[in-house]
Image (cartoon, helix red, strand yellow):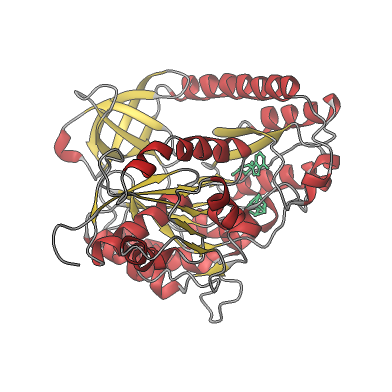
């Protein structure tokens, strides 16, 4: 392209996967001669990367799009596009509703966005591509930084589980795993660039490797490979399906020093009848058994969970089972959602019969129970020493530092800024519901040669 490059602003809704896709697209756009900006009001091109998992997320995007009507009609050069899950789901219907939209591009085709933008900017009319070939390359994914020392790395896409409420298999398609070598190379590049913690990302990360051949297939094998990347300090992986929490994966968390004792395993409900209607493939007892196995194998493990309230037909008694499960497991963190019917899914054929006030009330009750656990859990940690990865100055109190424990708890502490990106030991002195406070006592010995030797023998040091 000649002259001043057109500026593009990507506005992202939804999950980490979407944020990673936006990052990937930014790289592609920069390579194709576009300039990137965060200022939507001044950008020549605004792209919405969208989420369909709940109706609320879609409604917000629709209202944003509506607000561009005047600008789109006034400024002939202005380009507005919708990409991602909502584009995949609604396709041409979006253009029917917003006649001024220039581009609708689904999840499978978004690497073609630069090419489409050039077409649109040359005045050749709007483009809708929701077909794609199902092949999104992982190869050029640069890893998404969350802070200077932490990054997400996509290891698989899509989902084959077809939970009855979930739109993901329809908008993101079938599971595809990224070859282990490619993942390792990306992690090596990130590590060389100062990243100390990677979060391996997949909708259903425990089934990583299905469909790939080779002896390294499987999440446990991948963790073992990534564990050896030089300079890296920590590894997490999200999101896990309770049914696929194999002994091999638990063994990898227990045995590999860099893999953190943190599992995000959505339970969704504590009622067998609801779990069956959700097509989750396990009972509440299976879930509890999985938690027991994880805790036996990995004594320091903490679990995070997702829950949904107000699923079709959910009775008070069924909800009480969920509340009980949340209380009994004592999650480190719970993400709680009100059920929202999604077109195409099986549950959308059933009446959405739990009134919104009831959903809201159940949501509040789960949140309150989790908050009680949060406060108790963190108060009980005061006095202990924990390993933190130092992120840098704390957002809430820039005179202090903040970091995370291996179990993903946020800690704010006094200490020297130059320690950002290193592991340290913090003595915990105080807590609130969601934050731990303390003093950095000493920098821990960084995982070096001896630790690597230990890790190859298959047993990791735990504090
Ligand atoms: N309604 C509400 N929440 C949903 N989730 C997935 N589909 C729906 C839906 N239709 C929640 C699940 C999932 C999380 C990412 O979003 O709890 O784990
Ligand atoms: Fe959706 Fe279930 Fe797949 Fe998670 S496992 S993405 S909830 S279908």
Position of 312 with respect to 196 (left or right) is right
Asked where in the image residue 55 lies, by quadrant, the reply is top right
Residue at 55% over, 38% down: 57
For residue 341, side relative to residue 257 (left or right): right
Up-down relation of residue 69 to residue 112 (above or below) = above
The vertical placement of 287 against 328, above or below, is below
- The residue lying toward the viewer, choosing from 319 and 32, is 32
Image coordinates for residue 131, horizontal then vertical, percent: 57, 68
Residue 86 visible (yes or no): no
Residue nearest the viewer, comparing 366 with 131: 131
* Residue 440 in sight: yes
Q: Residue furthest bottom?
A: 214
Point out residue 400 in the picture as x, y percentages from the top left corner: 22, 25
Q: Position of residue 162 (x, y in %)?
A: 72, 57
Q: Position of residue 31 (x, y in %)?
A: 25, 66
Q: How many labels does the image show?
A: 0
Image height check: is 63 above or below 194? above
Q: At 51% across and 46% down in the image, what residue appears?
A: 98
Question: Split into 4 quadrants, where in the image is the C terminus?
Answer: top left
Say which residue appears at 29% left-offset and 31% top-offset.
402
Viewer-side residue, 250 vs 27: 27
Tell me the quarter of the picture where residue 322 sits.
top right
- Viewer-nearest residue: 226 or 4: 4
Give the position of the N terminus as an image quadrant: bottom left
Q: On the rendered structure, is 68 left or right of 166? A: left
Q: Is residue 349 left or right of residue 392?
A: right
């Amino acid at each position: 392209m000649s002259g001043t490059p057109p500026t593009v602003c990507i506005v992202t809704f939804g999950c980490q996967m979407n944020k990673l896709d936006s990052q990937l697209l930014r790289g592609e756009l920069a390579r194709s001669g576009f300039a990137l900006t965060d200022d939507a009001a001044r950008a020549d091109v605004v792209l919405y990367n969208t989420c369909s998992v709940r109706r609320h997320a879609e409604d917000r995007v629709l209202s944003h799009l509506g607000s561009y009507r005047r600008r789109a009609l006034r400024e002939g050069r202005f380009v507005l596009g919708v990409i991602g899950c909502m584009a995949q789901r609604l396709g041409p219907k979006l253009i029917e509703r917003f006649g001024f939209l220039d581009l609708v591009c689904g999840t499978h085709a978004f690497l073609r966005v630069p090419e489409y933008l050039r077409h649109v900017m040359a005045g050749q009319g709007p483009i809708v591509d929701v077909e794609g070939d199902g092949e999104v390359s992982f190869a050029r994914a640069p890893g998404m930084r969350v802070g200077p020392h932490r990054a997400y790395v996509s290891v698989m896409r899509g989902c084959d589980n077809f939970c009855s409420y979930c739109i993901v298999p329809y908008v993101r398609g079938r599971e595809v795993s990224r070859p282990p070598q490619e993942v390792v190379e990306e992690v090596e590049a990130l590590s060389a660039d100062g990243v100390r913690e990677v979060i391996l990302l997949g909708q259903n990360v425990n089934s990583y490797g299905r469909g790939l051949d080779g002896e390294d297939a499987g999440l446990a094998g991948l963790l073992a490979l990534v564990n050896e990347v030089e300079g890296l300090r920590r590894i997490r992986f999200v999101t896990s399906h309770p049914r696929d929490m194999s002994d091999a994966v638990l063994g990898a968390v227990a045995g590999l020093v860099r893999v953190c004792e943190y599992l995000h395993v959505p339970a969704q409900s504590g009622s067998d009848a609801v779990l069956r209607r959700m097509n989750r493939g396990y009972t509440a007892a299976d879930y509890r058994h999985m938690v027991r196995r994880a805790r036996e194998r990995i004594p320091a493990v903490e679990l995070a969970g997702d829950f949904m309230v107000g699923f079709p037909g959910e009775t008070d008694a069924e909800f009480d089972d969920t509340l009980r499960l949340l209380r009994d497991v004592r999650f480190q963190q719970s993400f709680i959602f009100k059920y929202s019917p999604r077109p195409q899914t099986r549950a959308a054929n059933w009446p959405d019969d739990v009134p919104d006030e009831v959903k809201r009330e159940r949501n509040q009750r789960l949140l309150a129970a989790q908050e009680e656990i949060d406060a108790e859990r963190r108060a009980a940690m005061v006095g202990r020493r924990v390993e933190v990865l130092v992120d840098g100055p704390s957002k809430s109190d820039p005179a202090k530092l903040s970091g995370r424990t291996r179990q993903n708890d946020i800690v704010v502490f006094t200490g020297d800024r130059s320690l950002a990106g290193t592991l340290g030991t913090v003595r915990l002195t105080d807590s609130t519901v969601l934050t731990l406070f303390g003093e950095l006592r000493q920098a821990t010995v960084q995982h070096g040669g001896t630790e690597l030797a230990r890790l190859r023998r298959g047993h990791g040091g735990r504090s």
